[in-house]
Image (cartoon, grey):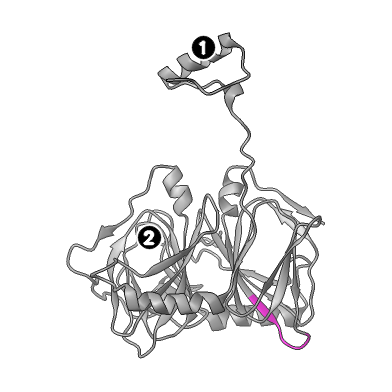
Amino acid sequence: MSTPATNEPRDRQQLHSKFAELGLRGYWQNERNTQRMEPKLWRWKEILPVLMETTEVIRIGPDAFRRNVGLQTGSKTLAMGFQIVLPGEAAAAHRHTNTALRFVVAGGGAYTTSNGEPMVMEPGDLLIQPNWVWHDHVNNSKEPIIWIDALDAGVVGFLDAHIFREEWAEGKQQPLTRGHGASRRLYGSARQPKVDYQGAAGVPYHYKWNEALEALKELAEQGISDPYDGLYVEYKNPVDGSHTFLTMTCYLQMLQPGQETRYHRHTGTAMYHTVQGRGVTIVDKNNPVELQWDEHDSYTVPSWRWHAHKNLSQTEPAILFSFTDRPLLQMTGLDREENG
C-alpha cells in the first residue's frame, strides 16, 4: 500500500508511522481546527408544515419512541429541536443522563409528568428535568402541542456518561403521585428549610409564562434595562438561586419598541427562540450576518462573536427566550465577556 505524498523528511515520516502503529501522536502533528459553528436561523413558517407532515408519517410507539425533530445547530455541547404530540397521544416514561428543558411554543392543556407530578403545559411555560428525572408526555387536549426540546447532549456524550434512555418498568406512563403545582409549592419561596434533591443535578420545576412576563414588565416600570440585552431575566435554580442547570441556563428578554442594543460578545453558545415580535440580531461587526427573525423563529449565536439585537417594530415589544452553555465555562474558568 502506498503512503500519501508528504513534504515531511523521511526520518519524520518513519517516526510518525511508528506512532500510528502504537496509537500515539506527537503534539506537533495536531493541526489547528479551523472549523467553527456559524450563526443560523430557522423560520417557523417553514418548520411548522414539516412538523405537521411528520405526524402523518411517524407514529409515537410503533415508529418512534418520541416525535422529535432536531435542528442542526453545529453546537458541540447543546442540542435543540421541536417535539410535537397530537391529541390522544402519549410518549412513554423514561429517564436519561441528559439534562432537558421544554419551552412550550404552541398548544396547551397537555402535560409532562416529572417524578410523578403532572405539569400542565401552556404557551410560554418552561419545564425543566435535570438528569435522571422520570418524565413522560400526555396530550389529552383537543389540539397538537409543540415545544422546544433542548439538552446538554454534546457535553454528556463527550464525557462518556450518555445513558440515552431507561424506560419506566411498570408501563408506558408513570403514576401521578403528586398534585399539579407540587414542585412550585415544594421549592418555591416558602419551603422546607432543607430540600432533598431527587435528581443528580437539581429538581424538576415548572416556570409559568405569566410570572416571567410580569418580571419583565416590572423591570420596565423600574427602568432596569441591560444595554446589551434589554429587559433581561434568568430562570434561576429553584433550590439555591444559581443557574437553571449545572450545564445550561435559560433567559427571557424583552426589547422595547424600536430598541437597539449595544454590541457585546462572550464565550458560550447561545440559542434563541422568538416568543413574540420581529427584529434582527446582527452577528459580527466586520462582514456582519443579519438574522432577521419573526414570531417563533429560532436562531443561534456562536461563542465569542460580536452580536446586537434590534426590535424592528416601533409599536410592539419583542420577546426572546434563550439558553446557553455558559455555566460550564464559568465552572472551568473559561468564561469571558467583552463589551463593544
User: Could you tell me the amino acid type at mark 2?
Assistant: Asp
**How dense is the environment of label 2, judged by Cα within 10 Å: few (below 14), some, or many (20 and up)?**
few
- The residue labelled by disc 2 is 196
- Callout 1 amino acid: Gln
The spot of residue 82 in percent (x, y) is: 46, 70
- Viewed as shown, does residue 23 lie left or right of 163? right
Verify whether residue 316 appears in magenta: yes
Residue 246 inside the magenta-drawn segment: no
Q: Which residues are magenta?
A: 314-319
Whichever of callouts 2 and 1 sits on the residue coming sooner in the sequence is: 1
Q: How far apart are labels 2 and 1 at the CA level? A: 59 Å
Mark 2 or mark 1, whichever is nearer to me? 1
Which quadrant would the N terminus be assigned to in this image? top left
Q: Is residue 247 above or below residue 170?
A: above
Label 1: few (<14), some or many (≥20) within 10 Å?
few
Quadrant for residue 84, please give it. Answer: bottom left
Quadrant placement of the C terminus: bottom right
